[in-house]
Image (cartoon, rainbow, N blue to C red):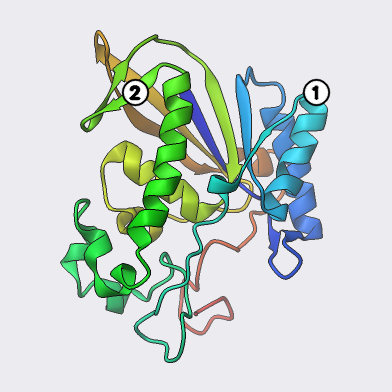
Amino acid sequence: MRLLLIRHGDPDYTADGLTDTGLLEAQLLAERIAPMDISEYFVSTMGRALDTVQPTLVKAGRIAVKCEWLQEFSISVHRPDKEGGLSAVPWDWLPQDWSKYPILLDREHWFEHPVFAEVDLKSSYDHVITEFEQVLARYGYVRDGLCYRVEHAGTDTLAFFCHFGVSCVLMSHLFNVSPMVLWHGLAMAPSSVTTIYSEERRPGIASFRAASVGDISHLYIRGQAPSFSARFCEVYGNGDRVD
């Protein structure tokens, strides 16, 4: 089995759509994805993901399953450096704040940190994982402890057009790590493709590994620079995002 986790193109967050650059990225992405032998397409119900998948679906003559659970994992939390109400998403903390708490890197206890416990983030996480596991089970891969029981092996490719935060949620479950490790350790540019394969090294027992994360080769081969929306400043004060 192969899983493609595809981030939406350069976003216009105000309109929940794509910028002109994002629309171009979606077209270039379609040239890459549409010729693939995709067994099933899944897409977030948010506008920027729907706008991203549309050129691929048109080019491939396919439809996608719309999934609310693939929406961005944007549950509001109290970020330690900000005052007032629920002011941030769980995957956007300053490193000097989250790094103080080793529990955040513990796959079995990360959600017990008071900031996450306050909003019962684990319930939202579990909802996404439950829906994801139902998809994998339909294709023959059933969670069994930290691995998967292969009920019927296959080489299907599933494409998920979604978002950065929720992609890290899915990967954290597949790789058995805290999502904080991925939320703060990875950057996936708009329209990037993350490719994950199953590996069955013993009959009936599978695990998943990433072959590539945040790949944007479809942009480079057409001379299109990647959008910056995914990162923060490389050097403080150089004009890029710092917050």
Categorize mark 2 by other alpha carbons within 10 Å: few (<14), some (14-19), many (20+): many
Residue 39's x, y, as percent? Answer: 60, 19
Q: Is residue 51 visible?
A: yes
Q: Amino acid at mark 1?
A: Gly
SS category of the residue bearing label 2: strand
Quadrant holding the N terminus: top left
SS category of the residue bearing label 1: loop
Q: Which residue corresponds to the image point at 42% horizontal and 55% vertical from the top-left?
A: 124
Give the quarter of the image for residue 42: top right
Residue 80's x, y, as percent? Answer: 34, 83
Q: Which residue corresponds to the image point at 52% horizontal and 16% vertical from the top-left?
A: 156
Residue under circle 2?
142
Tell me the tag on residue 61: 1
Give the quarter of the image for residue 239: bottom right
Q: Is residue 55 above or below residue 186?
A: above
Categorize mark 1 by other alpha carbons within 10 Å: few (<14), some (14-19), many (20+): few
Q: Is residue 16 above or below residue 79?
A: above
Q: Which residue corresponds to the image point at 54% horizontal and 22% vertical from the top-left?
A: 157
Q: Is residue 216 visible?
A: no
Q: Which residue corresponds to the image point at 54% horizontal and 80% vertical from the top-left?
A: 238
